[in-house]
Image: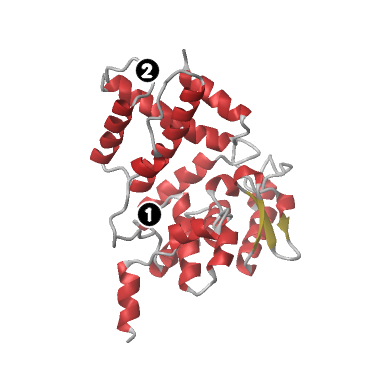
């Protein structure tokens, strides 16, 4: 029996978003691959023994704590599904017990670009001989609106209010949030719209960002561009890094965390606090140096 496919179908029927289903599917598939490759002698698709071994496998390979805990959460839902269907008898995973704890006194340091690194990236993408206007716009959108990569490629022209300088972002779970657009970013949008975009054979598309082959840019194309840009500016860039950078810089500049949470589209301020309120060792040292 294909437990993974039936699990995904169950999630779909339960109303989960496609992105959420993909996350569960990938984590369960990776777990199944581990069982197959490690020849774990199990007659059932999940047991306490196989789960504990898999979790240790992740720890031994230095997966991030946040990544491991996400997999624990997703496998717990898989366990619930198997138990509900009578495929397994036990509740083998307890999230509170099995999540990896961060040692007391340790802190999460959010990965973000420094002011100098931001300037280096922005200076590079200003060179029209090296970077297209569209790709420069992508960098500015990621940095100055904190949108996710899936959100940036889904922006449609009607989502942009050119009078009030706002952007409607359609995020996870179909939630919509409004973000203000800086004057320079709005000018860049208009420059792209009137130039490169207008010259595209797909200029009738409702989407803001167009590719050379289709009416909508794919998020993998954004990642590929940032991967090439990384080599040129000697930084490891990826879409979520710009989101983290935007949030971190806003907080460092004294913007209330409630406002930052709304910009990010988090469902609660607590989520923002857990991810971004921690300060780095350098931040604390810089603060003490002011005394």
Q: Tell me the quarter of the picture where residue 120 sits.
A: bottom left
Label 1 neighbourhood size at 10 Å, few (<14), some (14-19), many (20+)?
Answer: few
Q: How many numbered marks, from 0 up?
A: 2
Q: Nearer the viewer, mark 1 or mark 2?
A: 2
Q: Residue at x 26, y 22 (%)?
A: 38
Which residue is nearer to you in this view: 288 or 149?
288
Point out the residue furthest to the top here.
Answer: 1
Q: Residue at x 38, y 34 (%)?
A: 93
Vertical placement of residue 90 versus 138, above or below: above
Q: Is residue 44 visible?
A: yes
Label 2 neighbourhood size at 10 Å, few (<14), some (14-19), many (20+)?
Answer: few
Q: Residue at x 47, y 46 (%)?
A: 225
Mark 2, residue position: 44
The coloring applied to the image is secondary structure
Mark 1, residue position: 232
Q: CA distance from mark 1 to mark 2?
A: 50 Å
Which SS class for mark 2?
loop
Q: Is residue 145 visible?
A: no
Q: Residue 157: where, in percent of width, then height?
A: 71, 50
* Quadrant location, the C terminus: bottom left
Which SS class for mark 1?
helix
Would residue 122 be found to the left or right of residue 263 on screen? Answer: left
Q: Residue 147: where, in percent of width, then height?
A: 56, 54
Point out the residue furthest to the bottom here.
Answer: 291
Q: Residue at x 31, y 26 (%)?
A: 50
Q: Residue 49: where, in percent of width, then height?
A: 29, 27
Q: Tell me the quarter of the picture where residue 201 sits.
A: top right
Would residue 198 be found to the left or right of residue 244 on screen? Answer: right
Would residue 165 be found to the left or right of residue 223 on screen? Answer: right
């Amino acid at each position: 029996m294909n437990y993974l496919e039936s699990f995904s179908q169950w999630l779909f029927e339960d109303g989960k978003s496609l992105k959420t289903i993909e996350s569960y599917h990938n984590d369960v598939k990776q777990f199944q691959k581990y069982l197959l490759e490690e020849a774990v002698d199990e007659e059932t698709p999940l047991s306490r023994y196989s789960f504990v071994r898999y979790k240790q496998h992740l720890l031994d390979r230095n997966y991030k704590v946040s990544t491991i805990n996400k997999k624990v959460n997703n496998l717990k839902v898989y366990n619930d599904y198997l138990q509900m269907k009578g495929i397994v008898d036990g509740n083998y995973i307890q999230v509170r017990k099995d999540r990896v704890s961060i040692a007391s006194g340790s802190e999460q340091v959010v990965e973000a670009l420094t002011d100098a690194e931001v300037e280096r990236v922005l200076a590079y993408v200003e060179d029209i001989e090296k970077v297209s206007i569209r790709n420069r716009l992508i960098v500015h959108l990621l940095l100055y609106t904190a949108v996710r990569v899936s959100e940036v490629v889904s922006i449609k022209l009607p989502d942009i209010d050119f009078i009030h300088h706002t952007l409607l972002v359609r995020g996870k779970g179909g939630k919509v949030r409004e973000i203000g657009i800086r004057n320079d970013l709005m000018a860049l949008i208009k420059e792209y719209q009137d130039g490169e975009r207008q010259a595209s054979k797909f200029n009738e598309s409702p989407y803001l960002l167009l590719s050379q082959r289709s009416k909508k840019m794919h998020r993998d194309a954004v990642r590929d561009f940032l991967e090439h840009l990384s080599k040129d500016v000697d930084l490891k860039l990826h879409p979520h890094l710009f989101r983290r950078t935007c949030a971190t810089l806003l907080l460092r500049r004294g913007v209330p965390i409630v406002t930052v949470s709304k910009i990010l589209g988090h469902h609660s301020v607590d989520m923002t606090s857990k991810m971004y309120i921690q300060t780095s060792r350098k931040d604390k040292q810089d603060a003490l140096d002011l005394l």
